[in-house]
Structure formats: structure tokens, C-alpha cells
């Protein structure tokens, strides 16, 4: 006698005989399978986005897809941090800009140039950012499957990212996975607790590109390897596939998109002007009137460190002489600015309190630093009405001051930050390094975790404080700020640490020959327009770059269009 098979009302209702008779019966219909492979084949890493909002219900659908990913021991370790606040996206974009330049420095010259030509992220443009974090606080032995493969929780989160990516693509959304971050920096930005690790930043939005093939293939960076080259049978052969190629040499939203759009309808190949096109996009994205001219502000100050420790080849009186010549239009900076069609403003930055020599005492009293930054803000706001604001400086001994402040801000070694300045010899260079090292050590001993204003007071100078304020004032007015050399760039670095969104207004005019300048520009996430090994301060490099930038802005406005 046979009895009816008990069929469960929940769970799998099939039985062995049924499965044996039709082993392929679990497959979907051919149309669904084809659609799946179409979506997989059409998935792309999107870098350019429209600023239009993603409907909340669609965002939830995409996140649901991620939440349905497989996970080791069904641990579901993923946490999706959805970011839409502009301030957070601004900070994240600065971090990514910084890492892009750092990675580029690791490449051969050709690969470096090609990398810098690529748009590698859309953090400012995409309306939604999703940071996928992995909660690893459960001990591996307590999660089924992790005792043997402890990183399987990270792999689970990667599966969630792939689900999000495919669901987004099927719905017409674009997604880009950005890993141009130091993990600790991204974790700090989002206040992640110890034991929660990030897998990068997902840009999500409506794509402003529809690439038929992967972007890096389109740009000739690499090609897809044939399947047969990556499939092995049974075991790794003695002569396995070639190692992956290595190229190591020993490498905001409506406005951002609208700015870029003005270049896409030119009768020219996109990105024809290279770094200049990126600078033009950055200027236009600020959303104010397109500048047709501007002002070079030259801030001047004295520094006790110069006389106290013999760190300059020139007497302190030169500062006053160059400032006076700037006022009459005869200094090199003023003359260069005049040729670029810029106005010139000479500004004497004077501390209301006695200044220290860096090594034994703080450069500025805290109240003096605050007052000088406020003075600069007012000046920057005033100058912004005239167009570009270009930064220049003069101050005997200020490369030593700037190097010390750079070391404290960026945690640099003095050997990597202190340069020759205006004509130092080997002995003077060693004195400069010793002063900077001693000054930074003193400040670290006296301040456990100093904020930017504390560092500015301890190791900065009056002109650096004023230029910090000028940067903040001009940036708040939506006006581009063109940097010159190390001193102005260090002032900008302080400004960005005080108000990170200020970075969006910055244009690196040049990379000078001063040793620490490249590191400061990388920290700012800026690629310079010029690299002429200039030794002059006074805003010469900023004025030259401004002339180039204004020319490019006019060209963008007047060049032929395509329909």
C-alpha cells in the first residue's frame, strides 16, 4: 500500500522524484534569463550624473535588492549609510580628490597623465551617496563560515553592492563605486565606530552618460581579458595566467552638471583643454557671474623667526620694500598682474599682539589669529565683487613658517616640506629644517590634538591668517580663488579645514619649486595649471594662471556650438 506524500504548507514543496525527473525545472523562462544577462552585460561604473532627484520609493527598491544579498552565516553584516547632505558630500569629494592625486603620483608619467584626464567619481554630482559599511564587531568564530574565512563578511557586503548595482541599472539609474579614500578618513567622516569598516562610496543617480562599454576600456586604459585566460581546470598550473598588469613606476550637483554641460556642446572633443577644462568647470559650477577680470591681493607680514634663527638669505627690510613696490605697481607680482588685466591690492597684515619665533613661542596670540582671519574674510568678500581673487604674499622668512604649518597640518616630515625659499644655501636649509622640526615638536607637546585655528596661531604668520580669511570670504561669495605658491596654498589648507566646502572655489595656479608645495596641493585635491618651477612669491604664478583661466573662460563662452 502506498500513502500520499506529506506536502509541507511552508518551505520547499518539491520532492526528490520530481527534482530527478526535471533537474532544470528551477530555471526561469528564456526571456527572463535573457533580461538578466542583458542587465549584467549593461552594468557600468558611472561617473557623470544628472542632478535630478532619485524618488524615495526607487531608492528603497534598490536598497532592498542589496539587503537580499547572500551573506556568510546569514549574518547580514552590511549597513547602508545614505548621504544626501551637501556638506558631507563636499567633504567626501575633497577626500577623493586628494587620493586621486596621490594615486596618480605612483604611476609612470604616461599613466599619470592619462589617469588625471579621467573622471573617476561623481560625488559632487550624484544626488545620492551610499556608503556600504561592514559591521565586523561579531567575532569571526561566532559567525558560521567565518572561522575559516574571516573576510567572508566583507565578501558578503560586496555581493550586496553588486545587487544594488544591478537593480539600479535595471531601473535606469547609474551607479559608481568610488574607493578613492583612505578608509580611516571615510570612517571618520561618517563617525563609524571601531570595528565597522567601509567598502567605499556608491554614487547613485540618473546617469549623464550611457557608455556602451566600460569606461576604462573606452579610454584605452585596459581591455577585458578573454574568459579562457582566467578559467583554470582542477588546479593552478605550473605556467598559469599572466599576473595582472602593474603600472607602478616604483599612481555639488545641478551647478556641477550645468557647468560641465557648457563644454559638452562645443565644437570640440570633450576635455580638449585638459586641466584647464576642469578648472573652467569648477569656476562655472560656483554659479556666480562668470569672471572677466579679478584682483591680486598681496598680503605682507614680518616674521621674527627670520632674524632669530637666520633662516632667510635676505634682510627683513625687503618685505616693506616689495610691499611698497606692489602699491606703486612696480613689483614683479604687480607687474605680472597688470599684464593679466588684474587689479592689485597690497595689504599689510599686522598682529595686534607680539609675535613669537615659532621655535620657543607661538607665532601669534590666538585672539590675533582670529582677528586676522576675520580681517581677511572681510577683504575677500569685498574683492569678490570684482571677479577672480588671486592670492599673493611677501614676507621674509615665510617659507619657514609655511613649512612648519604644513608639517603640522599634514603630518609631514620637515625633510619633505622644507625648501630653499628665496636662495638659502645648504647650511641655511639645515637651520630651517631644525627650526621647523623643533617648532612642530613644541606644538605637539603643548597641544594634544590641536584644531586648525590653534595650529594657525602657533605656527602661522599674519599674512597666512589674512589669506585664510580672504579664501573663506571669496569662497562664501561664490568666487574662484587662484592660489600661488606654498604660503598661499597652506593658507587655503587651513581654510578648507575650517570650512571644507571652500575647496570647491580653489584653483591651483601653479606648483612652485618649494619642496612641500606638491604635498599641500595633493592634500587639497588640486591639480596645478602651471608647473614652471617659479621661485617668486608675490602672486606671480597666480596672476599667470589667472590670465590663462580667464582666456579659457572666454573661449568656452565664444567657441562654436553644435546642435
Image: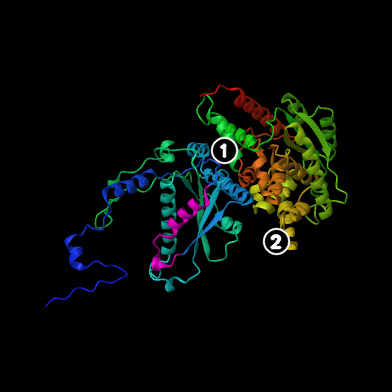
Q: Is residue 74 magenta?
A: yes
Q: Quadrant of residue 366?
A: bottom right
Q: Going by the image, does 219 lie left or right of 537?
A: left
Q: Please tell me whether residue 329 belongs to the stretch shown in magenta.
A: no
Residue 64 lies in quadrant? bottom left
Q: Mainly helix, strand or loop, the magenta region?
A: helix
Q: Decide which of 354, 357 is in the foreground and name it.
A: 354
Q: Marks 1 and 2, how far apart in space?
A: 38 Å
Name the quadrant of the N terminus.
bottom left
Where 294 sits versus 99, above or below? above
Residue 382, position as x, y percentages in the image: 80, 37
| Magenta range | 54-76
| Residue at image location 42% in from the left, 66% down from the top | 150
Counting every numbered tag in the picture gives 2
Residue 512 appears in the picture as rendered: no
> Mark 1 or 2, which is nearer the eye?
1
- From the image, tell me which residue sits under label 1: 257
Q: Tag 2, which secondary structure?
A: loop
The relative height of residue 246 versus residue 24 in the rendered view (above or below) is above
Identified at 65% across, 45% down, the residue is: 520
Q: Which residue is mark 2?
A: 449
Amino acid at each position: 500500500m502506498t500513502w500520499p506524500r506529506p506536502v509541507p504548507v511552508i518551505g520547499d514543496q518539491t520532492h526528490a522524484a520530481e527534482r530527478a525527473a526535471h533537474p532544470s525545472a528551477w530555471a526561469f523562462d528564456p526571456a527572463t534569463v535573457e533580461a538578466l544577462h542583458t542587465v549584467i552585460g549593461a552594468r557600468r561604473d558611472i561617473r557623470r550624473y544628472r542632478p535630478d532627484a532619485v524618488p524615495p520609493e526607487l531608492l528603497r527598491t534598490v536598497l532592498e535588492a542589496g539587503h537580499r544579498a547572500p551573506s556568510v552565516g546569514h549574518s547580514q553584516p552590511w549597513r547602508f549609510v545614505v548621504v544626501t547632505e551637501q556638506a558631507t558630500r563636499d567633504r567626501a569629494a575633497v577626500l577623493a580628490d586628494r587620493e586621486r592625486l596621490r594615486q596618480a603620483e605612483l604611476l609612470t608619467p604616461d599613466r599619470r597623465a592619462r589617469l588625471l584626464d579621467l573622471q573617476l567619481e561623481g560625488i559632487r554630482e550624484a544626488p545620492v551617496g551610499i556608503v556600504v559599511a561592514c559591521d565586523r564587531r561579531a567575532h569571526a568564530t561566532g559567525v558560521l563560515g567565518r572561522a575559516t574565512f574571516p573576510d567572508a563578511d566583507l565578501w558578503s557586503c560586496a555581493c550586496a553592492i553588486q545587487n544594488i548595482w544591478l537593480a539600479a541599472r535595471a531601473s535606469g539609474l547609474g551607479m559608481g563605486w568610488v574607493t578613492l579614500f583612505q578608509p580611516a578618513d571615510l570612517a571618520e567622516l561618517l563617525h563609524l565606530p571601531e570595528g565597522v569598516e567601509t567598502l567605499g562610496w556608491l554614487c547613485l543617480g540618473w546617469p549623464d552618460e550611457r557608455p556602451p562599454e566600460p569606461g576604462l576600456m573606452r579610454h584605452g586604459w585596459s581591455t577585458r581579458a578573454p574568459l579562457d585566460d582566467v578559467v583554470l581546470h582542477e588546479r593552478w598550473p605550473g605556467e598559469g595566467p599572466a599576473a595582472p598588469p602593474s603600472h607602478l613606476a616604483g599612481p555639488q550637483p545641478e551647478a556641477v552638471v550645468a557647468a560641465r554641460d557648457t563644454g559638452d556642446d562645443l565644437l570640440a572633443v570633450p576635455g580638449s583643454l585638459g586641466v584647464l577644462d576642469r578648472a573652467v568647470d569648477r569656476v562655472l559650477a560656483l554659479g556666480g557671474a562668470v569672471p572677466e577680470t579679478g584682483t591680486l591681493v598681496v598680503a605682507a607680514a614680518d616674521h621674527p623667526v627670520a632674524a632669530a634663527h637666520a633662516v632667510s638669505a635676505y634682510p627683513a627690510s625687503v618685505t616693506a620694500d616689495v610691499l611698497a613696490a606692489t602699491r606703486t605697481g612696480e613689483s614683479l607680482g604687480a607687474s605680472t598682474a597688470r599684464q593679466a588685466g588684474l587689479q592689485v591690492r597690497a595689504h599689510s597684515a599686522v598682529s595686534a599682539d607680539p609675535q613669537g619665533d615659532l621655535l620657543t613661542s607661538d607665532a601669534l596670540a590666538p585672539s590675533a589669529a582670529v582677528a586676522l582671519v576675520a580681517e581677511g574674510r572681510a577683504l575677500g568678500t569685498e574683492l569678490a565683487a570684482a571677479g577672480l581673487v588671486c592670492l599673493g604674499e611677501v614676507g621674509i622668512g615665510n617659507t619657514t613658517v609655511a613649512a612648519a604649518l604644513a608639517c603640522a597640518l599634514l603630518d609631514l616630515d620637515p625633510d619633505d616640506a622644507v625648501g630653499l625659499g628665496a636662495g638659502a644655501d645648504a647650511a641655511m636649509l639645515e637651520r630651517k629644517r631644525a627650526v621647523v622640526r623643533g617648532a612642530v615638536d613644541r606644538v605637539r607637546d603643548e597641544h594634544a590634538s590641536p584644531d586648525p585655528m590653534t595650529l594657525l596661531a602657533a605656527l602661522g604668520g599674519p599674512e597666512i591668517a589674512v589669506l585664510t580669511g580672504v579664501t573663506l570670504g571669496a569662497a562664501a561669495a561664490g568666487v574662484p580663488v587662484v592660489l600661488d605658491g606654498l604660503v598661499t596654498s597652506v593658507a587655503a589648507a587651513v581654510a578648507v579645514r575650517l570650512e571644507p566646502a571652500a575647496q570647491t572655489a580653489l584653483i591651483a595656479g601653479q606648483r612652485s619649486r618649494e619642496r612641500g608645495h606638491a604635498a599641500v596641493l595633493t592634500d587639497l585635491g588640486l591639480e596645478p595649471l602651471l608647473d614652471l618651477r617659479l621661485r617668486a612669491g608675490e602672486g606671480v604664478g597666480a596672476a599667470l594662471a589667472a590670465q590663462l583661466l580667464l582666456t579659457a573662460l572666454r573661449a568656452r563662452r565664444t567657441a562654436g556650438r553644435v546642435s
